[in-house]
Image (cartoon, grey):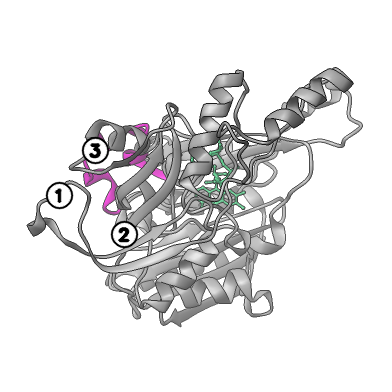
Amino acid sequence: MYYDSAGDFSVYNLRESCNEQRNVECIISVNASSVQDIQQTLLFAAKHNVKLVVKNTGKNTTFHPTFLLVGAPPSGVISSVLTVSPGTTWDQVYTAAHANNVTILEGIGAGGTVGAGGGWILGTGHSILTPNYGLGIDNVVQFTVVLPNAIHVTANNFTNLDLFWALKGRGGPSFGILTSTTYRTHLNPPITAAFYTATYSRAAMISLVTSLNTNFMDNGWSGFRPYDLNSLNLTFIALGSPPKSPNALSVYNEFVNQSAALPGVNVTLSVIKPYTGIFDWYEDNFVNTADDIGFNYTLSDIAGVPLSSGSRLLPRKTFEKNTSALAQAYVDFAAARPFIIGGGVLPSMDPSTVSTNPTWRQMLVGITLAFSWPENATDADIIHGHSKSSSIS
Ligand SMILES: Cc1cc2nc3c(=O)[nH]c(=O)nc-3n(C[C@H](O)[C@H](O)[C@H](O)COP(=O)(O)OP(=O)(O)OC[C@H]3O[C@@H](n4cnc5c(N)ncnc54)[C@H](O)[C@@H]3O)c2cc1C
């Protein structure tokens, strides 16, 4: 980053010449690599009335065996936290947590590309470990942030409490630009994974798996259950090896037996596999694609296509009171990847400690609905296509 003699950006001149010579708006990219860069960017944007979009890049993680929150009394030292700089990807954070023999509540994406200190955490952050450890925002102990007026502040439960609350779930750069996020970590328990694939006649299988959703979750399982027109996959994990929930395996086996007895169903894969920890499971199934079992995210994520998406949180009561209507709604989508990531400790966590939508506390399943179309589609095609929307997440 270069500043001119007045402390302003050198890019200012570029913008001026752009406007004068080509009579077009310029897009200026700022490679901000320090807090000062972010502060100068905000001042520049305010001074010149420039719209600002924050993107996430960066690469630092620091493990602290002990950590004193800014503003906390000396007796308030906490242990085992990990501070990540904005844009550090989850893949880098898993590796740092693993190197220190701890587990961190993480987002799962293809190759761990989602940022661990930006949009994920500001938007709440859900994880396959959420039923065990809460949402991303429940795991943050401190943020540092540059406010729109360019002042750099710390926010935690002792300092700037209202800002700390607001940052936990209101999304995007609404209140400033994050410069660090400090997460509590957890012990590194072994896990048990279940992988299942079946080809099917759709309605009966989706009805069965929908009716068993709460049973799976109440017995320690979380994960994904993607399906399409021809098959259903389960990628589940439970803490402990064997699972610490005593009925986890019997609930899973009961599902396998019931599903195999359905007309038209052919169970092509059913594997229970122990892992030494969440990192091993992640490496096996999301990084080393040659080792993956069953459904693999990495192979099926999409990018670079026109797409319209939205998401819904499905609360427990929908599964309990409207099971058949919900199953029918699932059937109406050509394909979907419901995330089984609620329940567990989540409903008992105080919604007032975070600013996110309180519905997150009651959610059992998160589902993203998406529809894509060919680049040359007409508006009419796109609108008509929405009525037959498929769903992915
Ligand atoms: C493959 C994939 C898998 C996913 N898996 C999960 C999952 O398991 N759980 C989950 O909860 N979500 C998941 N998501 C959704 C993901 O959390 C959001 O897309 C998130 O907004 C990505 O944030 P980012 O910082 O990586 O991206 P960006 O596009 O860089 O940022 C997203 C938003 O955050 C803002 N922002 C970024 N950095 C900062 C910063 N430092 N300060 C202030 N604002 C900032 C940006 O301006 C933008 O508004 C997934 C997404 C993908 C593509």
Q: Amino acid at mark 2?
A: Asn
Residue at point 30% right, 49% down? 142
* Residue stretch in magenta: 344-364
Badge 3 crowding class, 10 Å Cα cut-off, few under 14, some 14 to 19, many 20 or more, is: some
Q: Is residue 120 left or right of residue 4?
A: left
Q: Is residue 280 left or right of residue 11?
A: left
Q: CA distance from mark 1 to mark 2?
A: 27 Å
- Residue 132's mark? 2
Q: Check if residue 75 falls in the magenta segment.
A: no
Residue at point 52% right, 66% down? 92
The number of discs equals: 3
Mark 3 or mark 1, earlier in chain: 1
**Residue placed under numbered mark 1 in the picture:** 72
Label 1: element kind:
loop
**Disc 3 within 8 angstroms of ligand 1 (CB):** no
Residue at point 38% right, 33% down? 151
Q: Quadrant of residue 230?
A: bottom right
Badge 2 crowding class, 10 Å Cα cut-off, few under 14, some 14 to 19, many 20 or more, is: many
Mark 1 or mark 2, earlier in chain: 1
Label 3: element kind:
helix
